[in-house]
Structure formats: C-alpha cells, structure tokens
Image (spheres, rainbow, N blue to C red):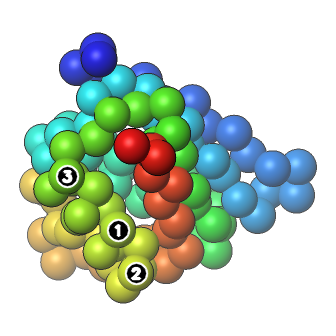
C-alpha cells in the first residue's frame, strides 16, 4: 500500500456533509493530516458533518483507535501550532476498512 495519503473531498448537494475519501496507508504520524482536513472543512462550513471514508485505505490499529476516539468524543487532538484553540468538528464519523 502506498505510504502517501490521497484524499478526495466530496460534498453533498446541500453542503451538510463532506466525505473525505482516503487512499494510501494511514499511520499515527500521517493521520494528523486527516484531523487538519476535518478541522478546516468544519471551519469553512460550521456544523458540517465530516465523514472519514477509509474503505480504500489501509490503517494502522493505533491510528484507527485514535480516529474512533475522536469520532466518539467529538474532540480532535491538539496539533502543533494550534495550542489552546478549540478544534472542531463535533460531527465526525469514521468508516473503517472491513479487514
């Protein structure tokens, strides 16, 4: 599996949801990019439901665990350079690969 992430954003027609379709290998290190994309999408359209679609990616167990925790709590981890800022979205879903 390709170690680079490729992400396609698909907005629904009424702009209530964006599906971030991820390809490549998701690791703990590069999963930060997914958090940044989720936060940016929500900052652009507050209240937007963000779906991380990982069906076409492979994912490290620790990265999947972190993403699921963020999905359950609605909190994104603090990222370098964003100390003290609240991070959105509150609506985050993760569609994990079957295997």
Residue designated by label 3: 61
With respect to residue 83, does 60 lie above or below?
above
Q: Secondary structure at mark 3?
A: helix
Q: Of callouts 3 and 1, which one flags the residue occurring earlier in the amino acid sequence?
A: 3
State the separation of the CA atoms marked 2 and 3: 16 Å
| Residue 1 visible in the displayed image | yes
Residue visible at 46% across and 46% down in the picture: 98
Q: Secondary structure at mark 1?
A: helix
Question: Which marked residue is nearer to the observer: mark 2 or mark 3?
Answer: 3
With respect to residue 82, does 84 lie above or below?
below
Question: Which marked residue is nearer to the observer: mark 3 or mark 1?
Answer: 3
Q: Secondary structure at mark 2?
A: helix
Residue designated by label 1: 68
Position in image of residue 34 (x %, y %):
36, 47
Residue designated by label 2: 72
Position in image of residue 47 (x %, y %):
63, 74
With respect to residue 3, does 22 lie above or below?
below
Q: Residue furthest right?
A: 13
Q: Of callouts 2 and 3, which one flags the residue occurring earlier in the amino acid sequence?
A: 3
Residue 24 position by quadrant? top left
Residue visible at 71% across and 59% down in the picture: 17
Foreground: 6 or 61? 61
Residue visible at 88% across and 49% down in the picture: 13
State the separation of the CA atoms marked 1 and 2: 6 Å
| Tag 1–tag 2 contact (CB < 8 Å) | yes
Tally of numbered discs: 3
Residue 74 position by quadrant? bottom left
Position in image of residue 14 (x %, y %):
88, 58
State the separation of the CA atoms marked 3 and 1: 10 Å
- The N terminus, quarter of image: top left
Q: Residue furthest top?
A: 2
Foreground: 19 or 84? 19
């Amino acid at each position: 599996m390709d170690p680079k992430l490729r992400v396609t954003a698909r907005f629904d027609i009424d702009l209530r949801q964006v599906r971030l379709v991820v390809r490549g290998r998701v690791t703990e290190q590069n999963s930060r990019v997914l958090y940044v994309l989720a936060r940016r999408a929500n900052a652009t359209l507050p209240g937007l439901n963000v779906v991380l679609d990982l069906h076409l990616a492979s994912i490290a167990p620790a990265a999947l665990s972190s993403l699921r925790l963020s999905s359950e709590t609605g909190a994104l981890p603090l990222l370098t350079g964003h100390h003290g800022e609240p991070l959105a979205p509150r609506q985050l879903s993760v569609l994990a690969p079957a295997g």
